[in-house]
Image (tube, rainbow, N blue to C red):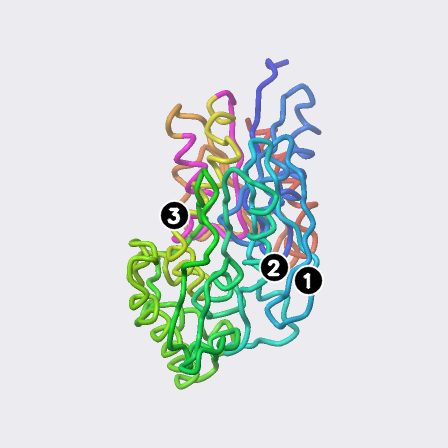
Amino acid sequence: MTAPSTIVFAPDSFKGSASARQAASAMARGWASVRPLDTLVLKPMADGGEGTLDAFESAVPGSTRMPVRVTGPDDRPVDASWLLLADGTGVIELASTSGITLLNELRPDDAHSRGFGQAIVSALDFGVRRLVLAIGGSSSTDGGAGVLEELGARFLDASGRPVRAGNRGLHHLSTTEFHAVRPLPPGGVDVLCDVTNPLLGADGAAAVYGPQKGAATAEAVHALERGLATLARSVSRAGPVAHPDADPTHPGAGAAGGVGFGLLVWGARLVPGSTGVAEICELPAAIASCDVVVTGEGSFDSQSAAGKAVSAVLAAASVGATRVDLVAGRISAPTVQFADALSLSVLAGSAEAAQVDAERWLEVAGAALAERF
C-alpha cells in the first residue's frame, strides 16, 4: 500500500450544475472511496461572483453568517447575509443582495445596487476590521450610485431633490455630495473583480453588459451609457471629496454595471477576484503542504487561464511545483499544464448527462484520479 498523501480540492463552481462546495465534496468522496487513508482538504474557489460566500464559509474556519434584510434590485425585500471571518473581516456578495437572479424580470433602467450598500452598512455598523466585496452577478447599471447613497452620498437633481434609484435617475443628476459618506473600515476595502472593463465606451459597462441586463436595443444601451456618463461628470465636479482613484477609465470601473466605479469613488481597491479568494482562503499555504491539488470548473477553455479560479490554483501550485489535476464539465483547450485532466462530458457520455447528475460524475472523476495517482 502506498503511503497516505494530502490532497487539496479547489474547484470553482460548475455553473448550473454544482456549487464549488458541492463539487469539492463530491470529488473528495470519490477520491476517498479509492484512497481512504489520504488527508483531504476542501478549498472551494470562486472568482467574486455568486457562490463566493459559500466558498469562504467552507474554506475559512470560524466563519459566521450574519443575516441582513435589504432592499432588492426591484425594491422587494431580500433576506440575505454577509460573512464574518474570524479575523474581523466582513465578506459581502452583491449577487445575493442586488443580483440579477433576484429579479422576476429584467429592469435595465430601474434596477439598482441599494441592497448591496445596505449590507455594507450592516457590516460597518457591526464594526468589521476590513471589508471584502464580491461584485459579480449584478442586476443594474447604476454606476454604484445605489451603494454610495446608502453609504451617505447624495445624488440631487437641479431642484435639489434626490434622483430616483437606477440608471434612469442618473439622467436627471445635477449635483453629487460626498461629505456625509461613511469612512472605510480600518483595514480598507478590497473588491473582488474579475473584469477589467472601464465605466464608459465600447468596452464599458453599458455596451458590454447592458444587453445581458435587459437593454435589448442599441438605443437602450446608449441610454444606459448617457446615465453613466452623467454620473461620471457629476463625480468629477465634486472635487477632492471623491477619492483620487475614482477614474472612469480605471480597469474594472465598469464591473457590475459600474459598481466598480462607485466603490473606487468610496476609496476601495479593486483586486483580481480569483486571486483575492485564494489569498483569503489561504489556498497557497494549503497547496504548499499537499501532494496534489485538484481544481476544476464547468468549461475549461481558452479563457480559463485569464483570471479564473483555475488560473489562481495553477499560480499557487507553481511556487512549489505541486502536481495539479483538472476536472471540467467539458475541455476545449490544451491541458498540458496539468498532470491529469478529466472531462465529465466524456465520463458521462454527453454534456447533457453530465449536467443532469453533475455530483455523481464529479465523484466518479475523483475516484478515477485517485486510481491513476
Across and down, in percent, residue 27 comes to 63, 37
Q: Secondary structure at mark 3?
A: strand
> Which region is colored magenta?
289-317
Residue 16 is inside the magenta segment: no
Neighbourhood count class around disc 2 (C-alpha, 10 Å): few under 14, some 14–19, many 20 upward: many
Q: Residue at x 46, y 67 (%)?
A: 154
Neighbourhood count class around disc 1 (C-alpha, 10 Å): few under 14, some 14–19, many 20 upward: some
The tag on residue 359 is none
Q: Quadrant of residue 339?
A: top left
Q: Earlier in the sequence, mark 3 or mark 2?
A: 2
**Residue on which the image places disc 1:** 78
Q: Is residue 238 above or below residue 105?
A: above
Q: Between residues 105 and 121, which one lies in front from this camera angle?
A: 121
**Residue on which the image places disc 3:** 269
Q: Earlier in the sequence, mark 3 or mark 1?
A: 1
* Amino acid on which the number 1 mark rests in the picture: Val
Q: In the figure, is residue 351 to the left or right of 291?
A: right
Q: CA distance from mark 2 to mark 1?
A: 7 Å
Q: Between residues 128 and 28, which one lies in front from this camera angle?
A: 128
Residue 294 is inside the magenta segment: yes
Q: In the figure, is residue 251 to the left or right of 31?
A: left
Across and down, in percent, residue 278 comes to 48, 37
* Amino acid on which the number 3 mark rests in the picture: Arg
**Residue on which the image places disc 2:** 97
Task: Give the position of the N terminus as an image quadrant.
Answer: top right
* Amino acid on which the number 2 mark rests in the picture: Thr
Q: Residue at x 49, y 72 (%)?
A: 212
Q: Residue at x 49, y 55 (%)?
A: 135
Q: Secondary structure at mark 2?
A: helix
Q: CA distance from mark 3 to mark 1?
A: 27 Å
